Image: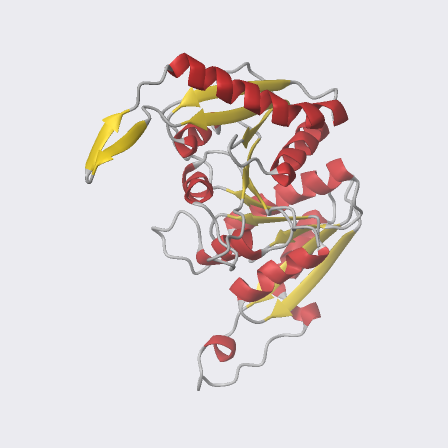
Amino acid sequence: MSTLPVVAAVDGSDDSLRALDWALDAARRRGVPLRVAHVRQYAAWTQPGAPVVVPPAPEDDQVLADVRALLENRADLPDTEYVGLDGAVGVLLPELGSTAQLMVLGSRGRGGFAGLLLGSNGMAAARDAECPVVVVPRPGREVHEQVPTEPGPRVVVGLQVDSPDEATLAFAFTEAALRGALLQVVAAYPWPIQSWAAPAELVPVMIDQDAVENETRALAEGFLAPHGARHPDVRVEPYVAPGAAAGHLVAASKDADLVVVGRHRRRLLAPARMMGSVTQAVLLHAASPVAVVPPTPPEG
């Protein structure tokens, strides 16, 4: 396993302290260092013509000082590094991912609009960082539906059988192994299936639903088999169901340890990094922490 650190992005908010606890546990499980990072954004960095504000020296960073005091008596504290950076949070936060194996942050930080379920800086990090990003939500998010499963530790991963992402599956299996958790694999298929018969006219296609579900399950099991062989101790529970993937993943997030989703592949006509609608919906509504995994870089 990589010895790159787990990064906890902090800003003094309660959200970031919850993320710090999650990152600390992740670093312990992986046996790697913890890097606590505070990006200090000042007006001079973002507003042309604003008066120059001299940022404090790193040793005078009150946010990092508070975290040091919070962690100094923790048992089994991994090697911990404290990093203070000055600049635009939405730019510097994703850049921290280039030298990390995992980044963890809260769903919202200081200064965010109260109505936002996920701050813009968190969205930027999940979209742009080179490493997986875990977003820890505020407690109390309500999920009104639930996917049936057994009690106990559980990691959930979304699987698109028409375009599976190996990096997402690999991360989910590794996380389940680290936690001794059940891996619940959500594979949704569209239903009812419709086709265009004429302009602006949709008609149902005469396809047997059981056949679609069985084919989806068979494809899912085929994609999961190589990962299962590498992690024989991980119990896998496929959940195959009709409807929107986002809804099933949010429902499965209730009482889960983690939900794992892929970010998005780059497309020919959209070369910039982006997040798919399913990933965004899960980030906004899941009750559990959500890991957003970047795709495997193309070879060559």
Number of marks in the rendered image: 0
The residue lying toward the viewer, choosing from 48 and 184, is 184
Residue 57 vs 251, above or below: the answer is below
Residue drawn at (74%, 36%) of the image: 29
Residue 148 seen anywhere in this rendered image of the structure: no
Locate residue 179: give its quadrant: top right
Horizontal and vertical percent for residue 45?
Answer: 52, 77
* Position of the N terminus by quadrant: top right
Q: Going 35% across and 18% down the picture, which residue do you hit?
A: 207
- Is 112 placed left or right of 193 in the picture? right
Image side of residue 280 versus residue 128, left or right: left
| x then y, percent, for residue 27 | 73, 42
Left or right: residue 224 compared with residue 229: left
| Vertical arrangement, residue 135 with respect to residue 256, above or below | below
Q: Nearer the viewer, residue 296 or 48?
A: 296
Q: Nearer the viewer, residue 160 or 52?
A: 160
Dividing the picture into quarters, in which one does residue 91 lie? bottom right
- Does any portion of residue 218 appear in the rendered image? yes
